[in-house]
Every structure is written in C-alpha cells, then in structure tokens.
Image: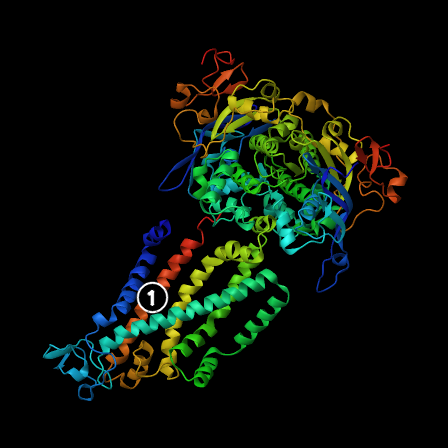
Amino acid sequence: MSTASALVAARGITVTYHRRRLLPLRERERPVQALRSVDLDILAGETLALVGESGSGKSTLARVLMRTITPSSGTVAFRGSDITGIGGGALRTLRRHFQMVFQDPFSSLNPRLSVGAAIAEPLIVHGLARGSALRERVGECLEMVGLDSSVAGRRPHEFSGGQRQRICIARAIACQPDFIVADEALSALDTSLQGQIIDLFQDLKERFALTYLFISHDLSAVRQISDRVAVMYLGQVVELAPTAELYSSPRHPYTQALLAAVPVPDPVLERARVYTPLRGEPPSPANPPPGCPFHTRCPRAIERCRSEPPALREVAPGRLAACHLAE
Amino acid sequence: MSASILEVEGLSISFGGATRRQLVTDVSFKVERGEALGIVGESGSGKTLTMLSLLRLLPRGADARVVRACFDGRDLFSLTPAALQDVRGREIAVVFQDPLTALNPVLTIGRQITEVLRRHFRSSAADARRRAVELLANVGIPDPPLRLRQYPHEFSGGMRQRVTIAMALAGEPRLLIADEPTTALDVTVQADIVTLIQRLQREQGLTVIWVTHDLALLARIADRVLVMYAGRVVEDAPAAKLFAAPKHPYARALLGSIRQDAPRRNRATSIPLTAADAGALGCPFAPRCAEARDQCRSVSPVLKVYGGDTRAACWALDDDGARGAGS
Amino acid sequence: MKFLASLYRSPQTRTGLILLTFVVLVALAAPLLAPFSPVNVDPSGRLLPPLSRVLASSTQGAPAHAETALHVLGTDSVGRDVLSRLIYGSRLSLTVGFLAVLISAVFGSLVGCLSGYWGGWVEALSAWLIDVQLSFPFLLLAIFLLGALGGGTLAVVLVLALGTWVNYARIVRAQVLSIKHQGYVEAAHATGAGTLRILFVHILPNTLSPICVVGSFSMALAILTEAGLSFLGVGLDPSTPSWGTMLNDGRDYLLTAWWIATMPGIAIGVTVLGVTLFGEGLRELLDPRGLR
C-alpha cells in the first residue's frame, strides 16, 4: 500500500492506560491496552470506515489521530510529516485541518452558547474571520447543512437531535478542514434520520473534497458511505478491505459474525437465515486472551490460534486480514 | 375466550397543566397470544408512553384516557393499585433500554431477582435462590451461583441486559414488553439478545411486544408491526406485508431509508423545524409527505382496514389499499 | 431579557427583588433622603426618642431653613440622628457585603476552577489551603486580622472575603470536574481552543448558576457578619455610620433608648430577607433551567 497518497498515516500505535489505585488489588493493577501496535493509512479523498464494538479501541484510535490523546508509542503522520510529537502553536495550526463530529449531539454543544457562537468557535480560535465576515460565514455553514441561517442566535436546546447533529457538522466544516472524523455520529439518531445525515456527509464530501474517518458499530450504516472498511477487535485491526468486497466476501471470522448479526429488512430472508450467536462475551481489554484475541469466540479456531497471534497480512490485492485461516 | 391477550382501544395521553399537549391520540391495537408485535416509530412517536400507560407508569401530570384496555379479559384501567401491583411483574413484565438504570447498583443481582420471586410467589429464601440460579442459566449466563453474588457494575452491558430479562421473567409473565432493549448494545450482543428472547418466547409461549426505532430489527422478530408517528397509529400490518409493500408514506420512507438497494438520494422527507404535534389538525405527517393533498392538511386520516389484516391511515389510499390515482 | 421577566414571575423572587431594590435606592439616594448629617454630634440632643422635635441649628447639620427639625427615629448616645445614620449605613453595609462577595467569589471560583481543571499539584495545594483555612475558627481569625490590620472598611471587606472564598472554591471545583468531561469541552479542545478559552468560554459560564446562588446567600451572611464584627468592636470605626456600629452603640441602651439598636436591627433583617429570598428564587430558576 503506497503511503504517498495517505493523508493520515498511523504506524505502530499503542495506547496503554495504567490505572493507579491507592490499594493495589490484583486485578486493577494490570494496565489496559486500548490499542496494540495499530497501523492504518487514510488515503486522501476517501471515506474510511472504522468498525468495531465496545472495547475495540476505535474511539481511542480516532483520538490518537486527532492528537487529543498521545499514544504510548507509535507515530502519526499528516501529509507525510510526523505530527506525533508536536505541540503548542504547531498543534493548533494542525487542528485547523482536522475536525471531529461526536456521538452525542446533546452534550457536544455548550448549552450556554448560541449555535452561531458554537459554529464560529473554530473560526475564532484560528483567527479566520471577524465581525460581519464571521457572521456571514456562520450563516453559510448553517445553510450548507440544511438549516436556515436565521437560527444562529438560538440555543441548542431549541433544536431536535437531528438538527443538533447538523449543527455539529456545520461547526466541523466551518474552518474548511481536510479531514473529518465522525465518531459514532449516527448512533444517537433514529434510523429514519440517519439516512439524511449520511446524505449530508456525502454532499459535503463532494463539495469540499473531504476525507472522512467514519467510526461506527453499525455495519449497515457505513456501507452506504464508505470506500474502505477497517474492522477492529480488542485494540487491533483484524480486517481491511474495499467496502463492496468486505460485505460480499468477508475473510475474518469476526467480520463474518458482525455481518451475520446485522438484521436485514426482509422478513422472508431473515427467517430463512440461521443465526448462530458468537460464543462467550467480548473479552475485556484489561485481560486479553493469548494468541489471536478472537479465538475464544471464533467458530473456526484451531490450535495455532490459541498460541500465535496472526499478523495483519495482505490476503488479496488491497485486502488485509489478521487470521491464520484467511489465506 | 378471545385469542387476544391484549386489546387496546382509543388510548389517548395528554400532558401538562397550563398548556395541555396531546402526546398520543386514539391508539388502538390487538395482540394475539404468543404473537410478537413490533412497534416502530421515531423518538416522540409515543410508543414508549403507550406501553407505560398500560401499566399505569406514566409520569405525574400525564393524563391517559382509554375506551378499553383489556389484558386477558381484565380492564387494566379499572384495577385497584394493589391489583395493579400484582399484574406488574407477574403478568406483564417490562425490559427497558438501559440496564444500568434498571438495576440497583448497591444490591447484588441475587438480591434483586429473589426480591421479585419473593414478592410474587412468597417463596422461601432457599427456593428463591434456587429459582434465581435457574433463571440466570436460562438466559445464558455462565456460572449463575457466582453471578448471583455480584453487583451490576461487574457485568458487561449485554450480560446486564440478560439479567434484566431474567428478572422480568422471574414473575412468569404472560406478556413481555421490551422497550428498546438492545439500542444501547453492540450489534453482536443485540443479535444474541434477540435470539434469546425468541427462544424464550418459543419455549414459554410468551407474548412479546417489541418497541424500537429500528425497523430492520423487526424483520427478524416480529409477526406483526405497528407503525406509530406523532402519537398515532399510521399502519398496522403483518410483518411480511409491511416490508414487502408498506401502505403509509411514512412507513415507506422508513423502509426506504434502511434498504440497501433503495435509491441513495431520498429527499422525500425533509426535516421540519419543530416536532410534530400530535394534537394538530390534519395528518401529522403531512408536512413531510410527498403526496400530501389539501384534505391531508385539514382532516386527520382514519384507520381503515385493508385486506382483512392490515390497517392504515392515509387519504391517498383507495378502497383496495392501493395508492390512489391523481394528485 | 427573558431571564429578568421570569425572575419577576415568582412571588418569592419578586418580594426579594423589591426589598433589595428599595434598599439599594435608599443607599443611592442617601444624601437626598437623610434629614440630618449622619456624623454631626449634638450633645444637647442625646438619646431622644423617635419623633422628637428639636430646635434647628446649623451645627446639627439640620435643614438650614427649618426652625425645628424632627428626629423621626430619635437620636443616639451622642445626639446623631438615627434615621440619617440608618440611611447612610445602608451604603456601607451594601458596599461591604457586595465587595466581600465579589472578591471571595472571584478568588474562590478561580482557585476552584484551576484546581478542578488541572488537578495535580494545583489541586493538592488548594486543597491544603482550604483545609488550613477551615481549621481556624473564623471569628478568631477575623479578630486577629482586624487587630493586626487596624480595622477600617477595606480590612473588614478583606476579612469577610477571606472567610467565604472556600465555599466557592469547593463548589466550582466539583462543577468543573463534571463539566470538563462534557462533549462540548472535548469538541472545543479538538478544534484547537487553548486552555484559557476553554476555561472562560466553556467551563466557567456553566458554573455560574451555583456561583450566583452562593453569592446571594453569602451577601446576606456578609452583612450580618460585618454587623457582628462591628458589634464586637473590631470592625469599623464607631463613628462610621454602619448598621453594625449602630448596634454596638445601642447595646448599652437596650432597655432605655431601645431605638438605637432596634432600628438597624430591622434594617439588617429587611435587607437580609430581601437577599435571601432573591437568592432562593435565583436558585430555583437557574437549576431546572433546562440546560439540556
């Protein structure tokens, strides 16, 4: 995979949390590895979906890329230059290019600020506009997300969940970033609204040539919007493939299980499908199984899986999978 | 004895002192014994309120009126508080969305389950404990005796929800109301819980009402689907028919937004600035409906029966339930 | 503003607001309202009961053109008009109360905010400071400091502020601890906002409501405490017209010239009632104010 066109490149990202307790009880002392040596490239202009369930580390990875968390080890590069260690003014300038849309539209807006002020924040922080130019730009952003510019003076609690999410998106595009991370941006919305927000994301991407990292636990939602999908499990990427191929022929057993678990809106098909639930519970990141992290729940686990962790290998052109059986 | 275990007719709920707001208007439906009824609608559609009102669990200030609400031949709204307490948990049980708030964090799971058993069956402590172990095993929790001694925070999200299901079933109810039980869970865990409830339904002849905003989920589990919008029932059909050919424009829009093969740009539904008011004149969906006519804006559509087993409330349907020609 | 309108609607707050406004107006218009000068002594007219008339004389500071002057509330032990002292006293009490609250609120909130946001040694240091402060009985501390500083208005204000900043620090710290994990703070951080901006634009405004509430209650307390300190003789100079010094002055005459102490007592009661009612109404309004 050429890194020449990678907008954001992560190598060897490891994030370990040490929990310090006053009374060291045996279990609590163990460090939690949220991410284990993750490599990921996000190509310019693509929408990469990062899919995983709780404990997979996807949100942590997003925050490492956004440089709001510092990794315990590993590097992050933006347009080829290393941004892992930068701080202060350089980091602030960088932030202009990276923006994030969060999961909960209710808590990601300051209840005391008008939505116009919230949208204006990135512009003010980076000194991009002032006075009437600022107001104009805020109005533009509101219109771009399908809201009327006259609502800029209202407070967040006057809007519905879907509208608030739109406002958060307006805030994210205000300073014309190159890269937007959407961290479960759809999860808090009703299914009927999700389609509209997906449309909006798509619209904005085409208009402004954006690059997206779309994080979700919902496979069906990301199918419509992503070019490639990376599946994470317990702090590692276990499969990475172009969307169509991932959905039609998943190579990793976990991806297969995820796809099988997603309900299909067709009762006839659904009744015909036999669903075998995954065995066991998702393991805790504080206590990962040896070998392949998935082997305790994998229907196809063999002896090798218990002892030897599989590497993320190319199993077909442009497709990576971390499974001994995925050749 | 009728086959319907639950019959609701003309349920209306309003709220507020000075400014009375109509939250649910004239809701009627029937649930057959052993059936799985799915109720789908967005936030604010009144689906949860409807269920709460049946068990008289509405918040203070909410006023519910009904023509008839019969559970197994008994009128729910005329029960004395003592009789109602007997019905709650013993005949009708509810599983809520967030297991964290449904479980008392300072009591062990064992204590919480045995409390239900001792309340409804006057079991001795030993009997209750034995039965609790059985219940936990039945919902797929490994090592029940150990788990009984643990506290809710020691369980994962999926396990907690299993525990609340076990608690709900402790009273051996005949009707289980599941209000968004899997919304907060990962998709594989959701599939697990769904499979679990289906199995329990089969084994115990349980009737289940499943409330959700995710229509796709109902394809897997519902025999019949009730679609609610702005506090009204807009469509009520067998699942197969609803998914194959929904009659109401809202149901069609809902289905369209989740189908993978639907045309991507579904601009038919634009977002109104204010939430739909259940008490407004005319069809509440009219502002968002692509097929709205003058009649729709002034007169509320009436639920009509089509084909013997489907009801829908839309002026655009002719007597056969086909889309009317013209306008 | 919508906020003021809703303030007016609650009968509690309305009463408090009316009382407060009345006192503030009196304080502002003191030179116009006071019939006499509050400091001029009149040895010949000492301890006169309310509604006594005296011959007007310029030495009293009475209205120049009058022949006789009426002491509506009587005179005190050195012949000063009680009403005038009461009116001028409102200025002092309000100023002292307000300044004390302002200083302690600003200082306490800042400490609480920084310790809540940064944690680490900042928090440890402020926690230690707070503990040290609290381990001293306030009155003892006040008397000692006032003795050392020599009394006077500024000293009293500072001592009062010293006594109450701890409350703000604690409350604000707790608030900040919960706010700093909110989504919008993380969003601001991700946008590149600096610490100062996050603190002053996002965190502090959301801690305002408890600060306002504690502030209004503190003001009542400050006025009372000032009166107490002056009563004890460590506060303001006895000739200064303040309600506290008036109480002190009237202490010896409670059974004979009861009006000297009673009048300021009533004034304090009315003011404190006004502030308390207002504060209570403010709390009710700011708390369930649908911040979400």
Counting from the top left corner in percent of width and height, residue A122 is at: 55, 47
Counting from the top left corner in percent of width and height, residue B164 is at: 64, 42
Task: Chain letter for mark 1, please.
Answer: C
Q: Amino acid at mark 1?
A: Leu
Give the vertical position of B63 relative to C198 (above or below).
above
What residue is at 86 percent from the left and 34 percent from the top?
Answer: A325
Counting from the top left corner in percent of width and height, residue B117 is at: 63, 45
Dot 1 corresponds to which residue?
Answer: C273
**Residue B31 shows up from this direction:** no
Give the vertical position of C248 relative to A54 (above or below).
below
Name the residue nearer the viewer: A157 or B177: A157
Label 1, residues with CA under 10 Å away: few <14, some 14-19, many ≥20 = some
What residue is at 55 percent from the left and 50 percent from the top?
Answer: A125
Counting from the top left corner in percent of width and height, residue A88 is at: 64, 56
In this rendering, would C201 be left or right of B193? left
What residue is at 72 percent from the left and 31 percent from the top?
Answer: A259
Residue furthest to the left:
C67
